[in-house]
Amino acid sequence: MKSPARTRKIPKFDRPLTTVDVVIFAVINDALRVLLVKRMAQPDEPFPEHWALPGGFVDTSLDRSLEACALRKLREKTGMSRVYLEQLGSWGSRDRDPRGWSATHAYFSLIPAPSYDDVVAGANSADVAWFKVSDRRAEIESKMPMAFDHGSIVTAAIERLRSKVEYTSLPAYLVDKEFTLSELQRAYEIVLGRPLDKSSFRTRVLAADLVVEVLGVRGGQNRPAQLYRLRSSANPVFFPRTFRSA
Amino acid sequence: MKSPARTRKIPKFDRPLTTVDVVIFAVINDALRVLLVKRMAQPDEPFPEHWALPGGFVDTSLDRSLEACALRKLREKTGMSRVYLEQLGSWGSRDRDPRGWSATHAYFSLIPAPSYDDVVAGANSADVAWFKVSDRRAEIESKMPMAFDHGSIVTAAIERLRSKVEYTSLPAYLVDKEFTLSELQRAYEIVLGRPLDKSSFRTRVLAADLVVEVLGVRGGQNRPAQLYRLRSSANPVFFPRTFRSA
DNA sequence: TAAATAGTGTCTATAAGACATTATCAT
DNA sequence: ATGATAATGTCTTATAGACACTATTTA
């Protein structure tokens, strides 16, 4: 199986372990939250019973690509497939995994608030939970140490999300397919952790041609609000400036 | 060597090949250029004699981390070590390398125009060249197909650079340690491919507290220009707005 | 009509773009 | 003086922020 020609073709280096992890954000109960899974209790597994990002080894027989692998993990944990997914970065070093030199390809995903059933799908549903993101710091509000360097990855994801929200339409992926401008503004405010001016928010969103009116309104015991949907859900919109203060 | 306990600890998946590639930019002869290296001529190597990004397999005995690996490749090809380096993303799939499932961690680097000697260091200096980036498209001006998916990686790097230059101080890493504001503006214009207004450029750069005056001027047969250096070379500065038109 | 939120309008502040003007050097 | 580029100033324009005001629903 290993002819000399083959040994010349395949490099002699030890191969690092290759994993994919996904930071999944949703706005649930008026708070930005991250989905984490609890690792198994086997003591020969690294970080038993620690909370970790959904992810794991690339299955070279199953996954055509890194993104396909990320989408698979996302589907397995949330049941959703048509969501926002972007690459966050990669973390690789000699010591991040006790099993050896390892590199993970991290993605981050934004999904609308899932119905209770969606998340409970999967066998180990008790070991899945949504952790609240701190309003002040770029981290989970729980002090529990996470598995591997997943704490750093979550921090990077929060920072990336917060900074991109300043000048993009990313929060549109956190609300339902049809939404009011107030709901969208609330999603911005929750991610940014600060209030925005209603007037300039609306001017900006409408000027960017981000949304399209749809038939229908959403109303409580007050004036009902016009419903909108994204003009094109494929790619986020970039605004010419960042949002300013409150 | 492979006890049952150990087989349980180490996952059974085939390990993808792991590489690191670096897209190195410099402004040379008034043009944005990318450093490429020619692959060896051995026919059992993939893409013999094709141009490729500097990079290669992670050496788990040599490289503590992905970034350390990227810095090593950068040093090997340019002799420089204190330069701007940021992660670009990762590309991994079943078919990007004929040797098997492979994933590369791509970085991008900005360096000041190297002296001739710097680049010629290394044994295979004839197989290293700076390729001009097209003013109009996000690609090299040469039509030669590159090795692997390195063409896509270069495209992504150019797009990332061009978009970040709109609102950051990145071009400051393309000029010498001491520079005039005109030189800095020229670096912006070369990367963006369009002229900028001198007055607003200067207002912006000075308002951002990006630079500090240093003693000395640089002059030809006209009024000499004040020299500046970066206030802090560690991290790029983000401007509140993007640059506009010409 | 009161309460509540949706939606609009007005004024101001800020910063960029256009472009003219002044400054300082070599020849 | 002339030519060249550095550096600054003035005016206009675009857009965000503050905040008041109007609109439309239910109770």
Image: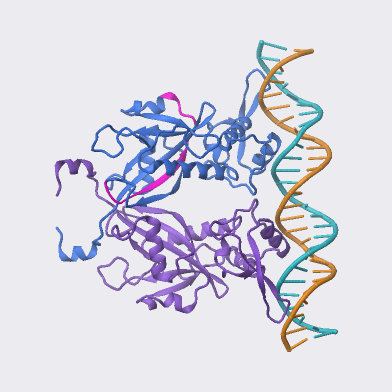
Chain colours: A blue, B purple, C orange, D cyan
Quarter location, residue C9: top right
> Quarter holding the C terminus of chain B?
bottom right
Task: State the image coordinates of residue C10 (x, y, percent, origin top left).
Answer: 83, 37
Residue A143 coordinates in the image, percent (x, y): 43, 33
Taking the view exactly as shown, the residue that stands out farthest to the front is B215
Whether residue B53 appears in this view of the structure is: no
Would residue A100 be counted in the magenta stretch? yes
Residue B20 visible, this orientation: yes
Q: Is residue B108 above or below residue A63?
A: below
Relative horizontal placement of residue B129, taking residue B45 as reference (left or right): right
Q: Which of the two residues, B161 or B9, is positioned nearer the viewer here? A: B9
At which x and y percent is residue A171?
55, 38
Image position, residue A54 (x, y; %):
37, 37
Which of the 4 quarters of the picture holds residue B105? bottom left
Q: Is residue D3 above or below residue B59?
A: below
Which region shows up in magenta?
A99-116
The answer to whether residue A144 is above or below residue A239 is: above
Q: How many marks?
A: 0
